Amino acid sequence: MIFVFICYTFNKDPMKKNNRVKFKTIFLAKNFSKNRKIDLLIKWGKEFARMGIAPETKGNLSFRTQFGFIITGTGTMLGNLRPKDFVEVLRIEKKKQKFTARCKGKIIPSMEGLFHNEIYNLRPKINAIFHLHDNLVLTKGEKLKIPCTEKEQPAGSLALVEEIRKLLKKRKNIDYLIIKNHGVISLGKTLLKAKEQIKFFNKQAKNKK
């Protein structure tokens, strides 16, 4: 049995209609194969929340699978994750300004799954993507010389995906970056690497005067 949910994400600025995202989720199955990596993300989500970089429902975590990627669902709190808060995205299809995510699970994937999908396509050696809201790094990012997207764009928008794509195409070797006035993204060949970078730059920002 196939279940279909439609989630519409709109930019709050009505003048920027090109940023509107229409996102449909098709569930091909209610469950996906068990993966021990989810247990790590549940544990680390609590750690990120204690660090103050995953407030409320902000932030999302994902890792590559054989068939796509597993990501935290929309509206989930990283500090209180449960196995049911994850969904496997098998593929995302685009037709004009409309997107269809074909998934396994019971929860709609994070709307920022669009840029996770883009990054996995651009960087085949990357197997984990962590997006957090580290305000300290945002404040000290320029002093730390952390690569940053050029323009501020609305969360979940096509324009934001394009900003991230442009930076990663320009700086092909970077594994940690700032989304301008938004948050940070850590890319890792392993989950541990993605986590270590989050903690490393948070510590660097704390020590930077």
Image (tube, rainbow, N blue to C red):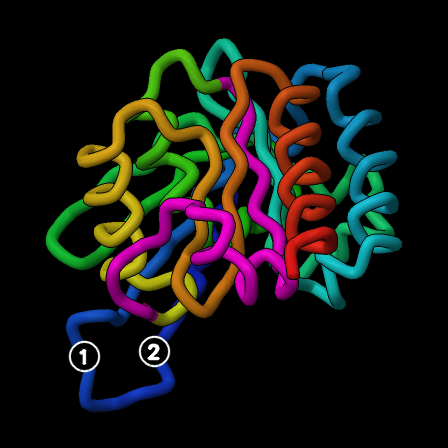
Give residue 11's mark.
Answer: 2
Point out the stretch of residues depicted in magenta: 127-153
Taking 191 as reference, is 169 left or right?
left
Secondary structure beneath label 1: helix
Q: Is residue 44 above or below residue 181?
A: above
Q: Is residue 12 above or below residue 142?
A: below
Q: Residue at x 20, y 33 (%)?
A: 169
Q: Are marks 1 and 2 in contact (CB under 8 Å)?
A: yes
Q: Residue at x 58, y 33 (%)?
A: 62
Q: CA distance from mark 1 to mark 2?
A: 7 Å
Name the image quarter holding residue 26: top left
Residue 151 at least partly seen: yes
**Residue type indicated by callout 2:** Asn
Spot occupied by residue 177 in the image (x, y as percentages of width and height): 44, 44
Q: Quadrant of the C terminus?
A: bottom right
Q: Residue at x 44, y 63 (%)?
A: 7
Question: Was residue 105 drawn as part of the magenta stretch in this picture?
Answer: no
Spot occupied by residue 117 in the image (x, y as percentages of width and height): 37, 35
Q: Which residue is the site of mark 1?
A: 17
**Residue type indicated by callout 1:** Lys
